[in-house]
Amino acid sequence: MCRAANALLITFFSSYFIIYYKDVIPSEVGTMPVEFKYEVVERIAVLSESSKGWTKELNLIKWNDRDPKYDIREWSPDGEKMGKGITLSDEEVAILKSALEGRDI
């Protein structure tokens, strides 16, 4: 049975980050670092804030130099750490918007 340990290194440059994610799997081959980067193009809204200062935000983010997508996730007070989130395409946001318009909120 193979067990994996994860290592994460974040390099912070204003609203532009490079994240190095290394999945360490004991093997003869060794490890292969996987790099991904993102840029916060537009901060659209802060949806909530926790007692520890983390904010749940809706942002427009470019992942790996691709077209920007809508992103909902939690961010640390200093903006250097992020929690798990969800990324939505323009089409998915349009469907979500349509679904919410018909609800009594």
Image (cartoon, rainbow, N blue to C red):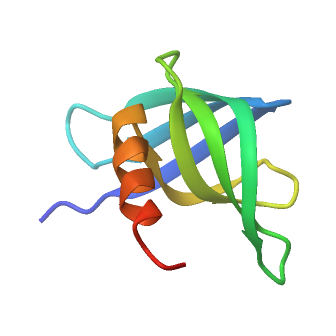
Which residue lies most toward the bottom here? 51
Horizontally, is 50 left or right of 35 in the view? Answer: right
In-image side of 81 versus 27 (left or right): right
The x and y percentages for residue 82 are 65, 54
Q: Quadrant of residue 72?
A: bottom right
How far across and how far down the image is residue 5, in percent? 40, 58
Asked whether, in this view, residue 68 is left or right of residue 74, the answer is left
Q: Nearer the viewer, residue 68 or 18?
A: 68
Residue 54 image offset from top left, x and y in percent: 77, 68
Which quarter of the image is occupied by the N terminus? bottom left
The extreme left residue here reads 1
Residue in front for this viewpoint, 35 or 30? 35
Point 45% across, 45% down: residue: 87
* Residue 70 image point, x, y percent: 53, 40
Q: Quadrant of residue 103?
A: bottom left
With respect to residue 42, does 7 lie above or below?
A: below
